[in-house]
Amino acid sequence: MNDCINCNEPNLEHWFYCKSCGERASEPKFTTNMYMIEEAAKRTDFEISTTTMDKTIERAKKERTKQGQDFWRGKLKEFKKRRGYANS
């Protein structure tokens, strides 16, 4: 199938967007709902949930900030230990 799904013009070069109408030239090959049926369908120990991009970004920022703080806290503790400072 090499024709645009919107205007039926030939799309021999398989462009993502049709050169004639400017719309998407073919149906998506993958969906955001794809999953493996075999083992995943048998498992009961995971949950599927939805979230917004904003919440995901905020959560990632918090996790990275915490990781950075933990990293530098550990480095400071190492430094103080090497220098012979009391734990503080």
Image: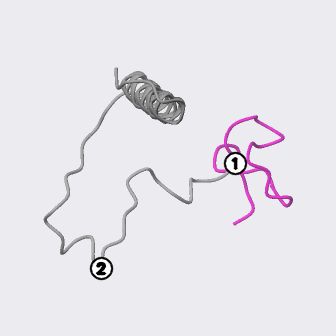
On the image, which quarter does residue 58 sit in? top left
On the image, which quarter does residue 36 sit in? bottom left
Residue type of the residue flagged with mark 1: Ala
Res. 25 mark: 1
Q: Tag 1's secondary structure? A: loop
Which of the image's four quarters has the N terminus?
A: bottom right
Residues 3 and 38: in front is 38
Residue at the outermost bottom position:
38
> Is 37 placed above or below 46 here?
below
Residue visible at 85% across and 61% down in the picture: 12
Residues 14 and 20: in front is 14
Residues 56 and 71: in front is 71
- Magenta-colored stretch includes residue 55: no
- Magenta-colored stretch includes residue 10: yes
> Is 67 placed above or below 27 here?
above
Which of the two discs, 2 and 1, labels the residue nearer the N terminus?
Answer: 1
Gap in Å between the C-alphas at discs 2 and 1?
A: 32 Å
Identify residue for label 2.
38
Tell me where residue 48 appears, x and y as whole percent: 24, 49
Taken as a whole, is the magenta stretch helix, strand or loop? Answer: loop
Q: Say left or right for 85 vs 6.
A: left
From which residue to which does the magenta span run?
A: 1-25
Q: Are marks 2 and 1 in contact (CB under 8 Å)?
A: no
On the image, which quarter does residue 33 sit in? bottom left
Tell me where residue 70 appears, x and y as whole percent: 42, 31
